[in-house]
Image (cartoon, rainbow, N blue to C red):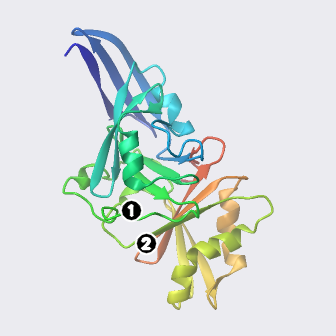
């Protein structure tokens, strides 16, 4: 090829994955660069100005990973049983973004949550202006190759492994922003109401990575005493986004997206 390249993700010792990128022009290698991917989950808020734009900046936490990799590269956004190739130029999603945005009817105040896995494949979750997942005909379906993209990796550290929420399961996903002065327990309670109202539960399990908290339920309400150890461990900051996934086995998975960087916060205890 005249001008192109390739990229791949390689596991290395420790807790990171590195991507090796090579560019070629007229058969000659121009540059070679390795960069690290620290977090697994990323958040992109869609402002009113950008809702109908033909291009879209990558989430802030991802942009540094694309610095210096050359004129352009391609990523794959997967959602359910469909996938969209997206060209990224200078950390901006260009070719393919308009088709992805149109197919999903992405509007102002929507949130695009990306789960970065390997080979620059990103699995997408789309929340509306009320922080509730938007479902499409293809949302709950998976294609025959889906297992290739979300096998559990031993060197991947995250609050909620992608493989736990990408199977064909009837999940409920929602979230909320941390706002000054709000009672975070009440917010958490509100997002869990569909589960707490329909089932006569005495407790629920909340899990992040390998850590689990058991929270008592009193007459459909989360018990404050047993909830506080969990909420205190999160060390929530203003404008952090709390992503919640309720699994069919009644387990709750949580990911905290850092407000300052729009990427998953990795705790020492994960």
CA separation in Å, label 2 and label 1: 8 Å
Residue at 40% in and 44% down: 155
Residue at 40% x, 49% y: name it.
Answer: 102
The single residue placed furthest to the right in the displayed view is: 181
Q: Nearer the viewer, residue 204 or 28?
A: 28
Question: Is residue 24 among what the camera can see?
Answer: yes
Give percent across and percent down for residue 40.
46, 46
Hey, which quadrant is residue 230 in on the image? bottom right
Q: Residues within 10 Å of mark 2 (few under 14, many from 20)?
A: some
Left or right: residue 166 versus residue 196 is left
Q: Are circles 2 and 1 on residues that touch, CB within 8 Å?
A: yes
Which label number is shown at residue 247?
2
Disc 2, SS? loop
Give the image quarter of residue 122.
Answer: top left
Please provide percent x and percent y for residue 54: 45, 37
From the viewer's perspective, is 11 left or right of 68?
A: left
Q: Is residue 33 above or below residue 205?
A: above
Check the image and report above or below for 170 versus 27: below
Element marked by disc 1:
helix
**For the point 67% across and 65% down, which residue is it?**
231
- Determine if residue 201 is in view: no
Mark 2 or 1 closer to N-term?
1
Checking the image for residue 55, the label placed there is none
Residue at image location 46% in from the left, 40% down from the top: 15
Write down the quadrant of residue 89 in the picture: top left
- Residue 242: percent from left, percent from top: 60, 59
Residue 32 in picture, x, y percent from top left: 36, 16
- Residue in the foreground of this view, choosing between 251 and 95: 95
Viewport quadrant of the N terminus: top left
Which residue in the protein does label 1 denote?
A: 164
């Amino acid at each position: 090829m005249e001008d192109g390249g390739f990229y791949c993700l390689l596991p290395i010792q420790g807790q990171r994955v590195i991507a090796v990128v090579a560019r070629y022009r007229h058969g000659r290698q121009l540059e070679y660069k390795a960069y690290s991917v620290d977090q697994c989950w990323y958040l992109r808020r869609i402002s009113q100005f950008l809702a109908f734009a033909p291009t879209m900046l990558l989430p802030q936490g991802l942009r540094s990973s694309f610095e210096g990799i050359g004129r352009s590269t391609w990523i794959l956004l997967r959602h359910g049983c469909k996938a969209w190739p997206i060209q990224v130029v200078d950390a901006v999603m260009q070719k393919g973004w308009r088709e992805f945005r149109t197919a999903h009817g992405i509007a102002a105040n929507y949130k695009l949550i990306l789960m970065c896995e390997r080979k620059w494949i990103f699995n997408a979750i789309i929340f509306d202006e009320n922080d509730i997942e938007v479902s499409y005909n293809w949302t709950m379906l998976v294609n025959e190759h889906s297992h290739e993209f979300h096998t559990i990796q031993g060197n991947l550290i995250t609050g909620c492994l992608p493989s736990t929420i990408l199977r064909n399961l009837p999940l409920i996903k929602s979230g909320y922003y941390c706002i000054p002065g709000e009672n975070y327990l009440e917010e958490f309670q509100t997002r869990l109401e569909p589960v707490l109202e329909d089932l006569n539960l005495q407790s629920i399990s909340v899990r992040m990575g390998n850590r689990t908290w058991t929270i008592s339920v009193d007459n459909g309400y989360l018990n404050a005493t047993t909830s506080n150890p969990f909420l205190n461990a999160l060390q929530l900051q203003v404008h952090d986004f709390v992503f919640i996934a309720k699994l069919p086995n009644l387990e709750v998975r949580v990911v905290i997206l850092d407000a300052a960087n729009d990427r998953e916060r990795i705790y020492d205890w994960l």
